[in-house]
Image (tube, helix red, strand yellow):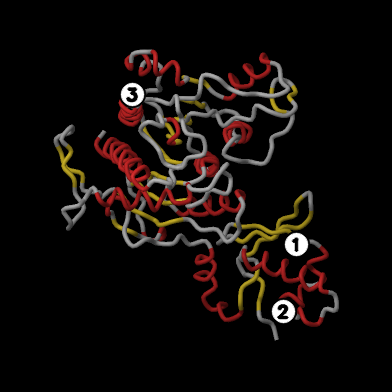
Amino acid sequence: MSLYKFSSFNRTIEGEEGVILHNTITRRSVGYGSDVEKVKDQILQQQVRTLESDVDKLLLQIIAAELLDRGAIVPVEHVNREEEYLNSLSAPILPEYGFFGCKVAKVQSIKDESNLIACFGVPCDVGASKPGSRYGPRLLRGRSKDMNFRGGRPILLDLFNKNTVSFDKLVDLGDVTSTRGNVQQWIANVRALLAKIPTACIPCMIGGDHSLTYAAVTHLWDTGKRFSLVQLDHHLDIQLWGKFKDNKPEYLDDLSHGNFVSWVKYQIPDIDILNIGASRYQSFSDISSDQVNQYINTVCKVISDFEVQNCEITSIIEKLPQDQDIYLSIDIDAINSIFIRSNTGFPGHTGICLDKFVSIVHFLTTKNNVIGLDLMEHGVSNNHENHYSSSTILANILINIICNINFH
């Protein structure tokens, strides 16, 4: 008697490396070669104990786990509600309360509403240099909710714009989850959630590992949207190591927080990228400086931390995009570590001072059309007061962006 069946939502794809099963609900794929075909009956019937070799038993268990995890096979008890079951595999975990106390909702329930900001967390730091940023969504949810400390319906008075902020245009979709601890699976899960967000909505990702920006940017581009990527970051996140050929890396290392911008440019050659706040001094290895400079210039334009610090804010603003569609990506290490003391990977000790940072973000979000955004690499600190104060600053930056999107 079979314990599992192949999903009716599978699609078979003939690839260069063999057959691939792609599930249209989970949007995950798995290789399905002749070796798997030979043991499919044992997998479906869970006949592990019939195998003599412990190695064969373990291999069969691994194959079954992969097929089950990606939705290629479904437990027979869920056959009558297969679509609901498959959706649950990648469904975000809904929190007790939303960012700034806004409503919490399943992605399937939200409407295709212009300027509705759909927030979600990515509690992931598997691609980072050290752990901690997986706590970013939780910290920012808690501190942002505290801004509505009067209780009742979440509403704030904006003394600058002379209006109220009711958060009716904000929804919290919960935290993306992953049953597998690798960057590629997290990217797949983020893209799966983004695919379910109505196209008129504005996705807002809170993290979490900055490499996941790659998932958001490539997904939005794949939907036909055209925009510039504006990256506020103390690092370029470009691969400046390894062998170079024709003034670019001969090959890219596995995607990580340190090279995801290289991967974005590789996948989307036509995208314009602006980095604001990168350290004036960049380390590179075994490459000529001419090659490095040409590659950086090919990938993005840069306004370095030194330039921001030593120029009037008006001259910096003159160099910023205006009247464009932009995706805004913020790595919190762009802000000087005097202000931000959470456990980010490499704090920006020479980062942008808070007043200039706020002015830059304000201009970008009032003078452009923000089609998506993220705030990444926020995490816990050994000192509670440090990540509490950092969360307060970031919550204020985020609410500034939300207000600008909704009122301009």
Discs 1/3, front: 3
Number of residues whose C-alpha sits closer than 10 Å to that of mark 1, classed few (under 14), some (14–19) or many (20 or more): many
Q: Name the element at disc 1.
A: loop
Compared with residue 385, is residue 76 higher up or lower down, i.e. above or below? below
Give the Cα separation between the discs numbered 2 and 3. Answer: 61 Å
Disc 2 residue type (three-letter): Gln
Residue matched to label 3:
356
Disc 1 residue type (three-letter): Tyr
User: Toward which corner of the image does residue 373 lie, by quadrant?
Assistant: top left
Which residue: 51% across, 39% down? Answer: 345
| Mark toward the start of the polypeptide (1 vs 2) | 1
Number of residues whose C-alpha sits closer than 10 Å to that of mark 2, classed few (under 14), some (14–19) or many (20 or more): some
Which residue: 81% across, 73% down? Answer: 54
Which residue: 61% across, 57% down? Answer: 28
Discs 1/2, front: 2
Q: Name the element at disc 3.
A: helix
| Mark toward the start of the polypeptide (2 vs 3) | 2
| Image coords of residue 357 (percent x, y) | 35, 27
Position of 103 with respect to 290 (left or right) is left
Give the Cα separation between the discs numbered 1 and 3. Answer: 53 Å
Q: Name the element at disc 2.
A: loop
Residue matched to label 1:
32
- Which of the labelled discs sits on residue 46, or is there none? 2
User: Toward which corner of the image does residue 374 lie, by quadrant?
Assistant: top left
Compared with residue 158, is residue 295 higher up or lower down, i.e. above or below? above
Split into 4 quadrants, where in the image is the N terminus? Answer: bottom right
Which residue: 66% across, 75% down? Answer: 5
| Mark toward the start of the polypeptide (1 vs 3) | 1
Disc 3 residue type (three-letter): Lys
